[in-house]
Image: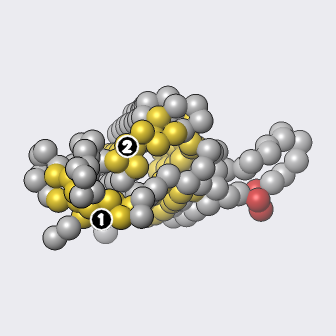
Amino acid sequence: MAIEYFAHETAIIDKGAIIGKGTKIWHFSHVMSDTVIGQNCTLGQNVMVANGVTIGNGVKIQNNVSVYNGVEIEDHVFIGPSVVFTNVKNPRSFIDRKAQFLLTKIGKGATIGANATVICGNSIGAFAMIGAGTVVTKNVKAHAIVTGIPAKQIGWASEYGHRLVFDENNMAICPESHEQYKLVDLQVLKLT
C-alpha cells in the first residue's frame, strides 16, 4: 500500500500511527504509535504527537508543539507556534500519574495563538479564538475570544475569525462571509 502523506526525511513516524491522505509532517517531528491524524493536516517543525492522540482533518499545528495523550483536536483547528498542552494537574517526576491524564478537547475551527498554554481538563469550543500568550485555565465557549493570564473573554468571533459586533437586537454580521449571528443566552448562533 502506497503512503499517501508526506513526511520529511528527519521526521519519525512510529509503526501503528494512522495518518490521512495529503497530510504533511515536517522536520524533526515525531508521531508516536496509536495516534490518528486526519487528512490534509500540516505538522510544522519539531511537533510531537503522543500515543492515543486524535487529530481531525485540515488541522495546522505550527512549530515546537507537543500534543500529549489526553488531547483531542477536531477538524480545521489552528495551533500556533510553541503552544503548550498539559495532561496532569499536579505532576511530580517521581510519581506515575498516567492513569490521571485529563481530557482536553479543542473544538472544530478553533484557533490557539502562539505561546498560549492550555491547562488539561478544559475544553475550547468550536471557532473560539485564544490570543497569543494566553493561559487557558477553564472551559472556553464556542466562538469566544479570550486573552490574558488567566484567560478572560473579551468578545465573540465568527467562523471566519472576525470579531462580531452585536447590535441592540443581539445580531451581528461577519464582515468577510456576511453570515449572520445571534447572541442568545451567552451563546453565539449562526443563522442560516
Give the residue type at disc 1.
Leu
Give the farthest residue toward the right: 94
Secondary structure beneath label 1:
strand
Q: Earlier in the sequence, mark 2 or mark 1?
A: 2
**Distance in Å between CA atoms under marks 2 and 1:** 14 Å
Q: Identify whether 169 is placed above or below 45.
A: below
For this view, does 95 lie left or right of residue 136?
Answer: right
Q: Where on the picture, by quarter, is residue 56?
A: bottom left
- Residue 9 position, x and y percent, is 38, 38
- Which disc number belongs to residue 13? none
- Residue 177 position, x and y percent, is 12, 52
Residue bearing mark 1: 189
Label 1 Cα neighbours within 10 Å, binned few <14 / some 14-19 / many ≥20: some
For the rendered model, the colour scheme is secondary structure
Secondary structure beneath label 2:
strand
For this view, does 30 lie left or right of residue 164?
Answer: right
Q: Quadrant of the N terminus?
A: bottom left
For this view, does 51 lie left or right of residue 89?
Answer: left
Q: Are marks 2 and 1 in contact (CB under 8 Å)?
A: no
Q: Identify whether 124 is placed above or below 146.
A: below
Give the residue type at disc 2.
Gly
Residue at image coords 88%, 47%: 95
Give the farthest residue toward the front: 168
- Residue 11 position, x and y percent, is 43, 40
Q: Where on the picture, by quarter, is residue 52?
A: bottom right
- Which disc number belongs to residue 155? 2
The number of numbered badges drawn on the structure is 2
Q: Is residue 129 visible?
A: no
Q: Nearer the viewer, residue 21 or 40?
A: 40
Residue at image coords 54%, 47%: 67
Label 2 Cα neighbours within 10 Å, binned few <14 / some 14-19 / many ≥20: some
